[in-house]
Image (cartoon, rainbow, N blue to C red):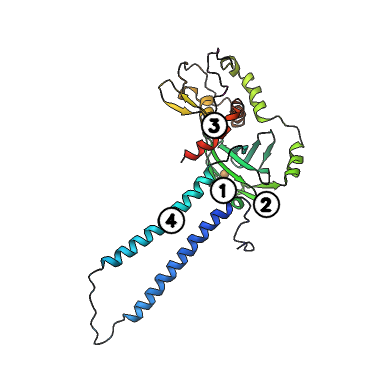
Amino acid sequence: MFNDLPLWPARASTGAANVDALYIFLVALSVFMCAAIFTMILVFAVKYRRRPGVAAEQIEGSNALEMTWSIIPMFIFLFIFAWGASIYFRERTPPRDSAEVYVVAKQWMWKLEHESGQRELNQLHVPVGRDVELIMTSQDVIHSFYVPAFRIKQDVLPGRYTTAWFRATKPGVYHLFCAEYCGTQHSGMVGQVVVMEPAQYQAWLSGGPAMPLPAEGEQLFNQLGCSTCHRADSQGRGPSLVGVFGKPVLLEDDRTVLADENYVRESILTPAAKVVKGFKPIMPVFQGLVTDEQVNALVAYVKSLSPPQRGQTANRAAVAP
Ligand code: CUA
């Protein structure tokens, strides 16, 4: 339905049909209600028009009528709410073992880094049939990552990570837009998502040298001197990072936080914000010293130290608003 209508973008992800179904339902319901209301207006205007010799009959209200037109719409709205919520939670929860792509937005381009180390500008290559999680941040202002064919749109904010995910179902080239006004060249902040057959994608991956993101992060971890304090044997002045990602962390003020991407990021840039119980706030601040790409590599490295905890990503996203 609507596949040939140019107003309707291609449907190229597993979530697209769900979003469309809800959208079509809402439009159809609105059209039906509009038609019903205007029909009634016309019918009543004719039927109860002023006629000589006929006195108007006064009506003082009807409880039965008012209950009917309150309760039936309430159930219709609750149904829409439940339907929308189920789609929302599905769209907000990246499946376990999604391929991860780090997205850095800036005025006015998209920078994409694959876990395997490939970097792209304004182009994202993905295989068909694979879950892909986007871990996104901005270098300057608020942008929004919007792929109409996948029916996904997520704001990209400076200073924190937001996530989105999709599974492409059809090979092809799809529009990538920025959907948040972000300056004079906002309308030019466009790109492409290239969905490829798995074999083609493998060929694309193997073209060009690339160091996997976690390996790049490990190199940086040593260069910046992180490794002198965060020793794997727990004898360092900072906590060991092995197995930390995806687990709850007890803090100095007895709060507990989940070690997700945002926590690792914050701990690199402003370490004093959340200090692990039993340690002193002696770590230097890296805000302004490392780029967003370098933070992404460090986050990828810390994640790689806890491989079995990957599923936690999904749990974390499920509870986030
Ligand atoms: Cu970036 Cu609009």
Within-10-Å neighbours for mark 2: few <14, some 14–19, many 20+: some
Question: How far, Cα to Cα, is label 4 from label 1?
Answer: 23 Å
The quarter of the picture showing ligand 1? top right
Location of residue 56 (image quadrant): bottom left
Q: Residue 244 in the image: state x and y as whole percent.
A: 54, 24
Q: Nearer the viewer, mark 3 or mark 4?
A: 4
Within-10-Å neighbours for mark 1: few <14, some 14–19, many 20+: some
Question: How far, Cα to Cα, is label 1 from label 2?
Answer: 15 Å
Q: Which residues are magenta?
A: 233-245
Q: Residue 175 in the image: state x and y as whole percent.
A: 64, 50
Q: Nearer the viewer, mark 1 or mark 2?
A: 2
According to the picture, the residue beneath numbered tag 2 turns out to be 170
Question: How far, Cα to Cα, is label 3 from label 4?
Answer: 35 Å
Image quarter of the N terminus? bottom right
Question: How far, Cα to Cα, is label 1 from label 3?
Answer: 21 Å
User: For numbered disc 2, what is the local secondary structure?
Assistant: loop
Q: For the image shown, how many numbered marks are present on the structure?
A: 4
Q: Which of the two labelled residues, at mark 2 and mark 3, occupies the earlier sequence position?
A: 2
Three-letter code, disc 4: Phe
Residue extending furthest bottom?
53
According to the picture, the residue beneath numbered tag 4 turns out to be 79
Left or right, 150 with respect to 253, comes to: right
State whether residue 220 is above or below residue 5: above
State whether residue 154 is above or below residue 240: below
According to the picture, the residue beneath numbered tag 3 turns out to be 261
Q: Is mark 3 within 8 Å of ligand 1?
A: no
Q: Which of the two labelled residues, at mark 3 and mark 4, occupies the earlier sequence position?
A: 4
Q: Which of the two labelled residues, at mark 2 and mark 4, occupies the earlier sequence position?
A: 4
Q: Residue 187 in the image: state x and y as whole percent.
A: 59, 49
